[in-house]
Every structure is written in structure tokens, then in C-alpha cells.
């Protein structure tokens, strides 16, 4: 897990890319009823804009609130670390899903100020929430923690080796 602000930024970028890409693919597949090969390329085209927005929302707003919520739900000092990971995932998804559903609805569906705005947003968030939570807990979270661990464990071991050689 991240130990410095730099590591938090790197972890956040990787997590946002994986989550946003997965959710874009999911939202493209919903109307079609299945995931088609062209959807992977379409998701990649959409990733930079939506990923940037998601990173900014998560890093400057949601991360602090989600961390406070996770600490209220668990005690990392006495409980297994996985409990905190699950609490953090649940808190983050509970905030990010409605926010990003609203933002992407405004960008891509242009509902304007129609009477359907609230119902479209709530329906979109309700469809996205179960997938976002499962994607976070079962795929993105473990994958990103593994990638992050490889990136920073190797660098830490290099620093230790360099100190030992001097």
C-alpha cells in the first residue's frame, strides 16, 4: 500500500485507469447485451477524459472521505488488514459511483435539465454500483495492489541492496 504522497498518486492513477476502463466497457456492453470486441477500443478512446476526471474527483475529494469512513468501519490496529481494504473499497465505490455516473451522464448523454435527469442518473448509478463494487473487490483491487507491490517492492529492494554495497 502507498506510503508516500508520490506512491498515493501512482496507486491512484493505476486504480483509476483499471476501474474506469472496466466500467466504460461495462456501460458499452449494457445496451448491446454483450461485450463486443470493438468496445475495448471505444473504451480506450474514452479513458483519457473520464480517467482524468475520475482521478481528480477521487484524489482531491473522495479519498479523504472514504478513508475516514473506512476507519470508522474498521480498526486496522486490531483487525485483519483485509477488513480495512474491503471497507475502503466499499466507501470509495459508494461515493465514486454516483458522482461518476452523474458526470458521465452529463458528458455522454446530454440530458439537459429534463424531468428525466434525476431518474436517468439514479438508474445509471444503480446499474453501475454492483459492477463497480465487484470489479473493485475481485479484480481491480487485487490486480492494482499486485502491480503496485511489484513497482515499489523492487525499488525498495534496490535501495536496500545499494546501501549494503557501500
Image (tube, rainbow, N blue to C red):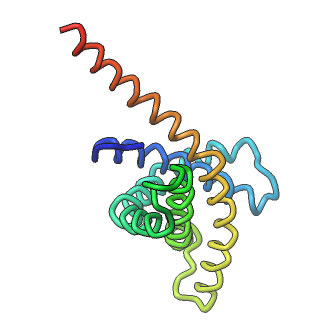
User: Residue at the spot x=43%, y=54% of the render?
Assistant: 77
Q: Nearer the viewer, residue 112 or 57?
A: 57
How many marks can you see?
0
- Evaluate whether residue 164 shows in this view: yes
The residue furthest bottom is 115
The residue furthest top is 165
User: Residue at the spot x=41%, y=44% of the render?
Assistant: 11
Q: Nearer the viewer, residue 131 or 34?
A: 131
Query: Is residue 33 toward the left or the right of residue 14 in the image?
Result: right
Question: Residue 60 sits in which quadrant?
Answer: bottom left
The residue furthest front is 78
* Quarter of the image with the N terminus in it: top left
- Evaluate whether residue 20 shows in this view: no
* Quarter of the image with the C terminus in it: top left
The residue furthest right is 33
Q: Nearer the viewer, residue 140 or 41?
A: 140
Query: Is residue 165 toward the left or the right of residue 111 in the image?
Result: left
Q: Position of residue 111 (x, y in %)?
A: 57, 79
Q: Position of residue 23 (x, y in %)?
A: 62, 55
Compared with residue 27, is residue 42 higher up or lower down, i.e. above or below? Answer: above
User: Residue at the spot x=54%, y=58% of the render?
Assistant: 89
Compared with residue 128, is residue 49 higher up or lower down, i.e. above or below? Answer: above
Q: Position of residue 113 (x, y in %)?
A: 52, 88
Q: Position of residue 94 (x, y in %)?
A: 55, 69
Compared with residue 109, is residue 146 higher up or lower down, i.e. above or below? Answer: above
Amino acid at each position: 500500500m502507498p506510503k508516500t504522497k508520490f506512491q498515493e498518486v501512482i496507486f491512484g492513477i493505476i486504480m483509476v485507469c483499471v476501474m474506469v476502463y472496466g466500467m466504460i466497457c461495462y456501460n458499452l456492453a449494457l445496451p448491446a447485451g454483450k461485450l463486443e470486441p470493438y468496445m475495448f477500443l471505444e473504451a480506450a478512446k474514452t479513458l483519457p477524459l473520464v480517467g482524468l476526471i475520475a482521478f481528480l474527483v477521487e484524489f482531491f475529494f473522495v479519498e479523504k472521505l472514504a478513508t475516514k469512513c473506512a476507519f470508522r468501519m474498521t480498526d486496522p490496529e486490531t483487525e485483519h488488514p483485509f477488513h480495512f481494504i474491503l471497507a475502503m473499497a466499499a466507501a470509495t465505490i459508494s461515493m465514486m459511483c454516483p458522482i461518476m455516473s452523474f458526470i458521465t451522464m452529463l458528458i455522454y448523454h446530454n440530458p439537459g435539465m429534463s424531468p428525466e435527469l434525476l431518474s436517468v442518473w439514479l438508474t445509471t448509478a444503480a446499474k453501475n454500483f454492483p459492477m463497480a463494487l465487484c470489479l473493485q473487490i475481485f479484480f481491480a483491487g487485487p490486480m492494482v495492489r499486485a502491480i503496485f507491490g511489484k513497482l515499489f517492492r523492487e525499488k525498495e529492494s534496490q535501495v536496500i541492496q545499494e546501501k549494503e554495497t557501500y
